[in-house]
Amino acid sequence: MWPTDSPRRRERQRRRAAVARCARASRASGRPDPLAVAATFALGALPGFLESACEEAGQPVVVQEAPYHQVLAGLLDPRGVFARATTTAGIVLLRGCDLARYHTTWTAERLAALADEYVAAFTALRARAALPMLVGFLPAATPAPLFDDWDRQLAARLARLPGVVVLGPDDVTRYYPVDEPFAADTDGARPPTVRRRRSSPRSRLP
């Protein structure tokens, strides 16, 4: 079962107040807020989508990308995009099945150890920078029980960390429905692209 943040209303209100302060500061300075983004897949056109969507929402951002498929290293790098003093928030997009792209010998024990590393990395980042974080676990085209379980278990652990908001696959498909969510001509290395709420055409997930 995917975690929810309903028991954490007070923490959510504090985060909203912090975001509102950042938005006011950004508007006052006239400069877009740096937004750090890391993913287990190539981001492709997603940074541009985020920047234009935030511009429409009245809070302009400039996306700063972590190295491709190096999420843990990006979170821990003391000189990386998540560690910069000017970074105002971070987004991490995960999908367990992407791990099999480069290693095919995953076991439950190895995945559990990796989950421990992720939790430690997020904890250390929050202690170092107190950076508001959004973590999204994205849908996969093909069910993979081993990796799906890893997604759910890691999401539940990250949702308990202060300053971390977790979205599951159902959140993505509920808020951004498309007729055919997965493109048949990708190998999973491309980023998910979602339908814009207004005039943009519908897109598909890899």
Image: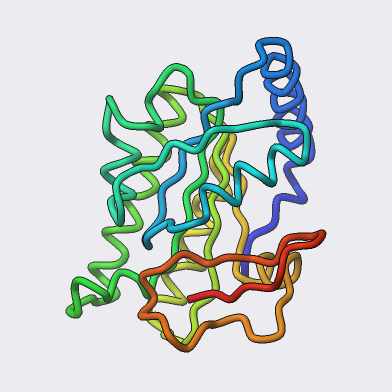
- Comparing 158 with 60, the one in front is 60
**Residue 94 percent location from the top left of the image:** 45, 60
Q: Is residue 41 left or right of residue 193?
A: left
Q: Residue at x 46, y 30 (%)?
A: 126
**Residue 33 percent location from the top left of the image:** 58, 26
Q: Relative to 24, does residue 153 appear above or below in the rendering? A: below
Q: Residue at x 68, y 21 (%)?
A: 22
Q: Relative to 1, does residue 81 appear above or below in the rendering? A: above
- Comparing 51 with 67, the one in front is 51
Q: Relative to 17, does residue 134 appear above or below in the rendering? A: below
The type of colouring in the image is: rainbow
Q: Is residue 187 left or right of residue 2?
A: left
**Residue 66 percent location from the top left of the image:** 35, 42
Residue furthest top in the image: 29
Residue furthest right in the image: 198
How many marks the image carries: the answer is: 0
Q: Quadrant of residue 42?
A: bottom left
- Comparing 75 with 150, the one in front is 75
Q: Residue at x 58, y 76 (%)?
A: 204
Q: Relative to 166, does residue 178 appear above or below in the rendering? A: below
- The N terminus sits in image quarter: bottom right
Q: Quadrant of residue 161?
A: top right
Q: Residue at x 41, y 48 (%)?
A: 38
